[in-house]
Amino acid sequence: MLILQQEYLKKVKKKSFIILTLLVPLLFVGMFALIIFLSMHDDKQERTIAVYDESTLFLGELEPEGTTQFHFIPKVKYDTLRTNLKGSEFYAILFIPENVYSNNTAQIISEKQLPIDLIERIARRLSRFIENDKRQKVIDEAGIPDLDERLAETRTTVRVNTLKVSETGEARKSSSEVAFIASYAMGFIIYFFVFMYGASVMRSVMEEKKNRIVEVIISSVKPFQLMTGKIIGTALVGLTQVGIWVIVGLILLGVGQSFFTPESAGEMSQSLMESSQQMGSTVSQDMANNQVADILELVGNLNLPLILFSFLFYFLAGYLMYSSLLGAVGAAVDNEEDSQQMVFPITFPLILAIMILFPIARNPEGPIAFWGSIIPFTSPVAMLARVPYGVPTWELLLSMALLILATVGAIWAAAKIYKTGLLMYGKKVNLKELIKWLRYKN
Amino acid sequence: MELFSARNVNKVFATTRALTNVSISVKKQSIFGLLGPNGAGKTTLIRIINQITAPDEGELFLEGRKMRQADVAHIGYLPEERGLYKKMKVGEQAVYLAQLKGMSRKDAMQNLKKWFERFEMNDWWNKKVEELSKGMQQKVQFVTTVVHQPQLLIFDEPFSGFDPINANLLKREILRLRDEGATIIFSTHNMGSVEELCDHIALINKSVKIVDGPTNEIRQKYKSNVFEVKYKGNFGQVDSALGYRFKILEHTEDEKENKISIQYLNGGSNNELLQAIIPAAEIISFEEIIPSMNDVFIKAVQESNNPKIQKDE
């Protein structure tokens, strides 16, 4: 108990804890802001692209695209420019061949690779131009005056709302997108915490061993008590940290809500609508409002209590398993360098779990998802990624049971290694040695 | 009265025997020296007493009853390999360690203040351990070992790394703790401190206890009939007067007095020796040499390593 408190206070008081607690949310917000910022202000470079239009369809029709200007050039210039683009004032040459109408191909000749984005925009522009032109011809030929409008009306986008039938026969709306995001996020959070706090336990054990204070401590308490105190203390540090984030998040949400009154929400969907209209689609304000409501409903329709419960369960079990193993490594080795090579085999399943997280979130019923969420070493991450989609009860129970077994086993093994390793100095430990320690009676 | 005893303790590590049938008995309010060459098993025995490792066989008794895990609260242990949390403040850390031994926070603070006063280390309370010198850290370690007023104190190589001033302070404190009622077991290579401090010793060699008894008796037992005689007179006359029954180990001649070290072969009374010398020279002083702990240690270990040598002599 005392160790727990000590470990907790020691870590919470540390500057790094405070900094990390403050920094991580900022970092996340900052990261998103940066991504948005970059994607918005990405293409600032001023370019002039020379256009040689063999088809003469586009002459004078290409408006500047962002910061990119188009400049039409005659064939003679095109020929000279082609061989010596470098040193000219042009960034690239766009060659529209004569048969573009039938062939649907144009070329961009440049020295450097153009941003994919820009190429796509140019392509879209050319396509739309030709498409409109073709359509106009069809309309003219058909001789129906409002054909354009009527055709526009035929455009339809079907949204497929997924409904899931629960055991009680009740059909609920579900959304793969929301589940996808939730599953990915949760898998990642678990991974992050298990890794971070497991490593923290290991460092703490190693510090005690290196300082040689550990012999004094275990002459007062049993090694197992020391290990448990340390692990639980660190877990509480983690929960405190999450708690702070949740509270800060809620406060921010509260502050945010007072800004986003229903009217402002309306305004927001208004502006959303406008922007979507600009993009050429026809969405009514009603639909926009519906979408917001839909998302809220979908989030509500996720089985939140189950998700929360499994999050806590897999977090705790996964953390206990990995932190006890890492703690044992901390006790077995003498220095940081040796620990690295022992840590890798232990954390490998965890890294593997993160790697299969994406396939799992895409196909939560596939074999990767199944085995990943049953095998204890990956299940904390993998199963959690599946839970938002709904998992058969027996699979969930099997996975939990196996994880509990593995956790108990890991703690047992860790306790043995821990006890033996703590007072062992100057011995280079390998896996064989560790297995020998497991066989010791005391 | 006996405070602590270990009976027939055996301990085997994977391939090596650490302790073979070792029994010790420690009297209350005494200082018990646990001696032996490196790797003999001292530290293992000490760890067993501290309940850090369990013996394969054998039992431990404290105040006549079997020892339990909870008894570690009555033990103060200063390990050979010792350290402190480097980043923690001295006072905070001392309180924590005392609390681990079952003290309340308040009592711990009170006792610590006293000890910090005595060791003149009051201003260290809020310093981080890493800011202290090694000698200072050792004082802190000593204080944290004794602060919970344990009945039984165990020091493993307490003097290693201490400068002479601190070593003296430590000796003084150990003696004072004994006088105040504590019982002390300590292991050391420093034979000088054994002579000064220990009431009783046990010597372990290669996992087996080879010598056990009160310090004085053991030194008596290991004496080899060596005498130092100071005299006025001629060395040659003394030499011839002694004859074949005595062996002269060394002699020095000086203007004031001559000195001679004699080993008395085949026993006999001290008077015989005196009678042999008196006719040859004027005796100034006559003293039987009691072997130092150092000699006892070396002799005992050598004998146990090569039992033959003894017989051949």
Image (tube, rainbow, N blue to C red):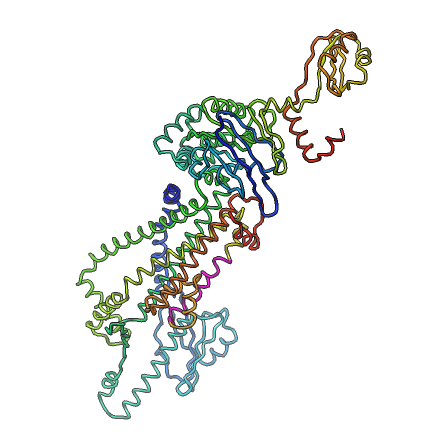
Q: Main secondary structure of the magenta part?
A: helix
Q: Residue shown at 41%/37% (left/top)?
A: B100
Numbered range of the magenta stretch: A345-364
Which of B90/A134 is in front?
B90
Q: Residue shown at 76%/28% (left/top)?
A: B313
Which quadrant is the N terminus of chain A positioned in?
top left
Most distant residue in the left direction: A263
- Report if residue B5 lies within the magenta region: no
Q: Position of residue B91 (x, y in %)?
A: 40, 32
Q: How many marks?
A: 0
Q: Position of residue A362 (x, y in %)?
A: 38, 71
Residue A267 lies left or right of residue A141; in this view the side is left
Q: Position of residue A168 (x, y in %)?
A: 24, 72
Which of A427/A66 is in front?
A427
Most distant residue in the bottom direction: A142
Which of A267/A109 is in front?
A267
Write down the quadrant of residue A13 in the picture: top left
Which of A125/B164 is in front?
B164
Q: Position of residue B79 (x, y in %)?
A: 52, 35
Q: Residue shown at 51%/58% (left/top)?
A: A345
